[in-house]
C-alpha cells in the first residue's frame, strides 16, 4: 500500500498548518508533486509533518504557475541531489532560475514512465490568458488501481481522465485528487463532468484547490461516501 499526503493546500482543518494558494503532495516516501505558493509555507508544513527534504528523490511540477512552483526553491536549496520533472514548454525564465542549483532536470515530452509505478501524462496544452500553457499530471499505479494527481487541470479534467484511461484501459481507476479547475462552471456543466468521471469508472474523488466550492458540492452530491476531502495533512492510502 502506498500513501499520498497533502503537504500544502488552501484547505486546512488544523490551524498549525500554513495555508495559502496552491497545492503540494507527497506520494510514497520520496516523490513530491508540486510545491505550493511559498518556500516558507512549504518548509513550515513539511517540518510539522516530519518530512525531510533530503529524503526526496524527485519533485514534479505540474505547470509553470507561481502557486505550484513557489515552494520549489526551498527543496532545491536543501536537496542538491533531487531530480526535477517538468514539461518541455516551461518558460525559459523558470529554467534559468533552476539552472544555478545544478540539479538533474528531466523535461517530459509525452506520456512516459518517470519512476517505479509513476507516470507523467506528458504535456497537455490549454489556452491560458491568451497564451499556450503546458501542464502534466501524475499517474500512480497501485495495488488498488490507478491514482491520478492533478495540479490545476487547465487542459480539462475530462481530457486528462480520458488520456489516463487510454493508457491504462484494463486497470481500475481508484482515485482522482487535486485541482480540477471548475470555478464558475454552471451546474449543468458540472453534472456532465461528473458523468464523465462515472463513465470512466473513477471510484473515488478528492477535488480541491482550484476546483471551486460549487463543483466540490456537486461531486460530493454525486459521489457521496466516495467523495474525499483533501485538507493539508490528509493521508490517502492508494
Image (cartoon, rainbow, N blue to C red):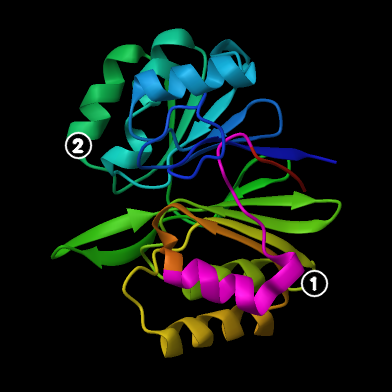
**Residue 127 to residue 89: above or below:** below
Does dot 2 land on a helix, a strand or a loop?
Answer: helix
The magenta stretch spans residue 228: yes
Looking at this view, is 234 or 52 the one in front? 234
The magenta stretch spans residue 129: no
Q: Which residues are magenta?
A: 214-233
Q: Which residue is mark 2?
A: 92
The residue sitting at 38% across, 26% down in the picture is 72
The residue sitting at 57% across, 70% down in the picture is 161
Quadrant (top left, top right, bottom left, bottom right) of the N terminus = top right
The residue sitting at 37% across, 40% down in the picture is 68
**Residue 235 to residue 167: above or below:** above
**Residue 152 to residue 161: above or below:** above
Where on the picture, by quarter, is residue 236? top right
Checking the image for residue 170, the label placed there is 1
- Categorize mark 1 by other alpha carbons within 10 Å: few (<14), some (14-19), many (20+): few
**Residue 15 to residue 129: above or below:** above
The location of residue 148, given as percent across then percent down, is 62, 56
Where on the picture, by quarter, is residue 99? top left
Looking at this view, is 236 or 146 the one in front? 236
Q: In the picture provided, is 236 more to the left or to the right than 158?
A: right
Checking the image for residue 147, the label placed there is none
Does dot 1 land on a helix, a strand or a loop?
Answer: loop
The location of residue 140, given as percent across then percent down, is 68, 49
The location of residue 151, given as percent across then percent down, is 45, 51
- Categorize mark 2 by other alpha carbons within 10 Å: few (<14), some (14-19), many (20+): few
Looking at this view, is 47 or 24 the one in front? 47
The location of residue 64, given as percent across then percent down, is 30, 43
Q: In the picture provided, is 110 more to the left or to the right than 87?
A: right
Please name the predominant secondary structure of the magenta segment in the image.
helix
Contact flag, marks 1 and 2 (Cβ < 8 Å): no
The residue sitting at 51% across, 19% down in the picture is 82
Amino acid at each position: 500500500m502506498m500513501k499520498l499526503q497533502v503537504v500544502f493546500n488552501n484547505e486546512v482543518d488544523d490551524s498549525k498548518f500554513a495555508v495559502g494558494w496552491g497545492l503540494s503532495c507527497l506520494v510514497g516516501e520520496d516523490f513530491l508533486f508540486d510545491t505550493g505558493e511559498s518556500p516558507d509555507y512549504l518548509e513550515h508544513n513539511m517540518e510539522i509533518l516530519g518530512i525531510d527534504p533530503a529524503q526526496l528523490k524527485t519533485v514534479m511540477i505540474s505547470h509553470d504557475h507561481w502557486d505550484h512552483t513557489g515552494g520549489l526553491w526551498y527543496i532545491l536549496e536543501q536537496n542538491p541531489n533531487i531530480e526535477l520533472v517538468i514539461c518541455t514548454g516551461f518558460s525559459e525564465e523558470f529554467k534559468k532560475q533552476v539552472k544555478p542549483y545544478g540539479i538533474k532536470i528531466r523535461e517530459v515530452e509525452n506520456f512516459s514512465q518517470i519512476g517505479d509505478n509513476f507516470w507523467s501524462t506528458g504535456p497537455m496544452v490549454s489556452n491560458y490568458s491568451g497564451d499556450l500553457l503546458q501542464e502534466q499530471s501524475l499517474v500512480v499505479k497501485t495495488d488498488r488501481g490507478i491514482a491520478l494527481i492533478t495540479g490545476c487541470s487547465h487542459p480539462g479534467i475530462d481530457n486528462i481522465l480520458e488520456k489516463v484511461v487510454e493508457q491504462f484501459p484494463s486497470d481500475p481507476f481508484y482515485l482522482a485528487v487535486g485541482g480540477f479547475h471548475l470555478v464558475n462552471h454552471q451546474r449543468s456543466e458540472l453534472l456532465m463532468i461528473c458523468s464523465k468521471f462515472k463513465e470512466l469508472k473513477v471510484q473515488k474523488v478528492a477535488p480541491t484547490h482550484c476546483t471551486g466550492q460549487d463543483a466540490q458540492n456537486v461531486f460530493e452530491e454525486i459521489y457521496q461516501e466516495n467523495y474525499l476531502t483533501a485538507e493539508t495533512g490528509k493521508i490517502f492510502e492508494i
